[in-house]
Image (cartoon, helix red, strand yellow):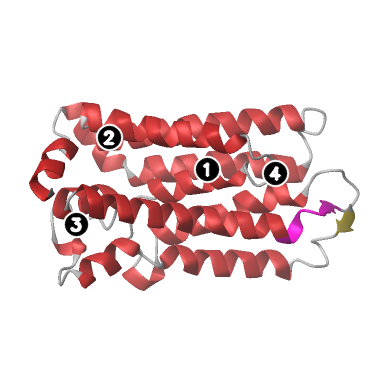
Amino acid sequence: MTEIDFSQQWYYLVLCAVVCYFIGCFNFAVLISHLKKKDIRDIGSGNPGTMNMTRTFGLKVGAINFFCDVIKGGLPAVIGWIIFKDYVFAGTDILVSDFIRYFCGTFVIIGHIFPVTMKFKGGKGIASTMGLFSFALPCEQWWYFPIAVVFLFGVLAYIAITEWGSMGSLIGVSGLTIWQTALFLVRYEKELLNPWVVTLLLMLFLINFLTWFAHRKNIIRLLAGEERHTAVKKKKKKYE
């Protein structure tokens, strides 16, 4: 392993942050809806995300949008891992690739939720967050991928059955966060006070917090019994 000192090569982190933020700013829901001669921001809930796309254009379009956002959240993490997989932080045995995957993902999600290109009013980051978590660990061990797939389809099944899109999304993201946080707690149990490990764990918390924060209005409506259902079954029938 090669050591890297980010106090001297800090510009790598700045570059990753800027590039990933602008990747996050690219919104597939807006692009797809424009291809259909509409603007998803003027329809339904106005949210440029998978749920509103599904309600508006049907299950197939919603699924395309979902998987595009999954790739958007996951691919930067994979690239970061490939670039830094042979590096450790100077003076430690902490893998830079463990840190950089979630560093890249965090800025993609921030860009998705608060895009400068859309006056900081973006989507809610669920699909991109699931993409990050689904791609991050399989980079190092292929058998993590089936676990991530089970989480993804478990969330989709929950939403299809209960029609509670926001609740299913938050449960899925929280489950993935807990799983991957637990893994790094075990991996670095002897170095939990190392600043890089602390920052990694804080990023995992931040990612989860951002998705909950983006759903704050949905949570209020859920508690008040006023949340809209995501009628996947009806949409499927309507658009088939």
Asked if disc 3 and disc 1 are in contact, CB closer than 8 Å, the reply is no
Q: What's the residue type where badge 3 is placed?
A: Gly
Q: Look at discs 2 and 3 and give the one toward the viewer.
A: 3
For label 3, the crowd category at 10 Å Cα-Cα, with few meaning under 14, some 14 to 19 and many 20 or more, is some
Identify which residue is drawn at 35% across, 37% down.
Answer: 169
The answer to whether marks 2 and 1 mark residues whose Cβ atoms lie closer than 8 Å is no
User: Percent position (x, y) of residue 43?
Assistant: 13, 59
Compared to 49, does 233 lie above or below?
Answer: above
Q: What's the residue at 70%, 40% (across, down)? A: 198
Magenta segment: 83-89
Q: Which mark is residue 134?
A: 1
Which disc number belongs to residue 46? 3
Residue 84, by quadrant, is bottom right
Q: Earlier in the sequence, mark 4 or mark 1?
A: 1
Secondary structure at badge 3 equals loop
Residue beneath label 2, please? Answer: 219
Q: CA–CA distance between discs 2 and 1?
A: 25 Å
Question: Could you tell which of marks 2 and 3 lies nearer the N-terminus?
Answer: 3
* Residue 203 seen in the current view: yes
Label at residue 213: none
| Cα distance in 3D space between marks 4 and 3 | 38 Å
